[in-house]
Image (spheres, rainbow, N blue to C red):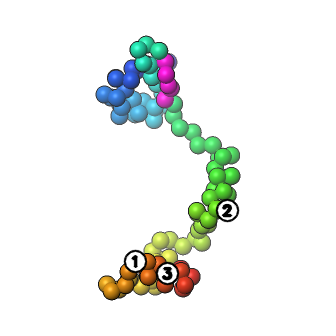
């Protein structure tokens, strides 16, 4: 059976209601006695993730990994000198192919 909570009650006890949702419960949110929303546990849709990632790769927002950890990827990079601006350091990294 789903839980019912008014907007006021939900705001006052949001963490408790979110814990219920994490545990698999549904919460019907009401305003002045009328249903306005339903909180349900999140379920990722693997079918949507593929096209989304492809779009991010295509648009250059995301780059596929090369299997290196962050520490391995940063090994060998130099820190920016105090006299060098961040922009100059980034441009230098781009020129070096990092």
The x, y position of residue 86, in whole percent, is 40, 77
Task: Write the residue at 43% across / 77% down.
Answer: 87
Q: Which mark is residue 86?
A: 1
- Locate residue 81: give its quadrant: bottom left
Report which residue position mark 2 lands on: 58
Mark closer to the chain start, 1 or 3: 1
Residue 39 against residue 77 in the figure, above or below: above
- Start and end of the magenta stretch? 35-39
> CB under 8 Å between callouts 1 and 2?
no
Depth check, mark 3 against mark 2: the one in front is: 3
Secondary structure at numbered mark 2: helix
Q: Which mark is residue 42?
A: none
Distance from the alpha carbon under mark 3 to that under mark 2:
23 Å
Report which residue position mark 3 lands on: 91
Q: How many marks?
A: 3
Secondary structure at numbered mark 3: helix
Distance from the alpha carbon under mark 1 to that under mark 2:
27 Å
- Locate residue 71: give its quadrant: bottom left
């Amino acid at each position: 059976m789903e839980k019912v909570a008014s907007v006021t009650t939900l705001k006052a006890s949001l963490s408790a209601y979110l814990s219920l949702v994490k545990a698999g419960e549904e919460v019907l949110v009401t305003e002045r006695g009328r249903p306005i929303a339903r909180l349900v546990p999140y379920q990722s849709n693997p079918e949507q993730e593929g096209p989304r990632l492809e779009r991010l790769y295509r648009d250059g927002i995301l780059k596929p990994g090369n299997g290196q950890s962050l520490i391995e990827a940063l090994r060998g990079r130099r820190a920016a000198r105090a006299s060098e601006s961040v922009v100059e350091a980034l441009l230098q990294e781009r020129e070096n192919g990092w």
